[in-house]
Image (spheres, rainbow, N blue to C red):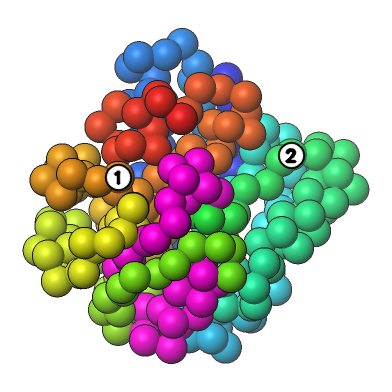
Amino acid sequence: MYRIGQIVPSSNTTMETEVPAMLRAREAIAPERFTFHSARMRMKEVTAAELAAMDDESDRCAAELSDAAVDVLGYACLVAIMSRGEGYHRESQKRLLEVTRANGHPAPVVTSAGALVDALKVLSAKRVALIAPYLRPLTEQVAGYITAEGHEVTDYLALEIPDNLAVGAQDPRRLETLVDRLDHHDADVVILSACVQMPSLPVVQAVQDRIGKPVITAAVATTYRILAELGLPPVVPGAGALLDGTH
């Protein structure tokens, strides 16, 4: 039995459903079993100021999850990391690992931001197109962060939804229409949801099948990295190319 810890924004309603859904789907084809445990950082509006204040709470959350001796710790907010400067996921992961180590229960740390850029490398993606719910300035920061990691962002859609609960209330089927507004002709990979709060899992495989190129999301990338850190084959049926067992 593996204990999966997640640090989530207090208003996040998606990562505690999509990550378990993927790992439950994996349980249907593999012997490993998982339990899920969360700690929360206060955040209601997706603004630079609230994101920075929220991120400052992540050390406390890491210590709390370490109290439960989790086997891996996932920081489930992509934009909170990417809005703090290029390459910040490495600093965050290192610091939170030290928190767990000092608490006597060291656990590998995955950030959604780091997992996403790692997934692009796994898929050998040079060019990407993405959809994000954030305000345009934050979406531009996300695009810039990805660019700084060595990938060209060919196009993006910023849905400009500041309220995090409203982001979580989006109908994932809307993404099937939104992807047609995205210029992904030259993209190697489409990031259908560059946000762990915007629901997307129900349509990942369908969109990938329709557009004929790999489709990932922040949640899918996080799940891949969680499994990799546990030393388990990163295979989840119906969750797109990254988790199809070929990487």
Question: Does the CB distance between marks 1 and 2 fall below 8 Å?
Answer: no
Sooner in the amino-acid sequence: mark 1 or mark 2: 2
Q: Is residue 185 above or below residue 98?
A: below
Which of 206/104 is in front?
206
Badge 2 local density, few (<14 within 10 Å), some, or many (20+)? many
Is residue 162 in view?
A: no
Nearer the observer, disc 1 or disc 2? 1
Q: CA distance from mark 1 to mark 2?
A: 30 Å
- Image mark for residue 214: 1
Q: Quadrant of the N terminus?
A: top right
Point 39% across, 33% down: residue: 243
The correct choice, above or below, for 58 with respect to 93 in the image is: below
Q: Is residue 28 above or below residue 158?
A: above
Q: Residue 24, how many percent across, how many down?
A: 37, 27
Image quadrant of residue 193?
bottom left
- Numbered tag placed on residue 107 in the rendering: 2
Q: What percent of the width, then of the height, locates residue 49?
A: 57, 88
Crowd tier of the residue under label 1, counting other residues whose Cα lies within 10 Å: few below 14, some 14–19, many 20 or above: many
Label of residue 174 in the image: none
- Res 190 seen here: yes
Q: Amino acid at mark 1?
A: Pro
Q: How many marks?
A: 2
Magenta region, residue range: 118-147
Q: Residue furthest top?
A: 31
Q: Who's the residue at 30% across and 45% down the image?
A: 214
Relative to 162, residue 148 above or below: above
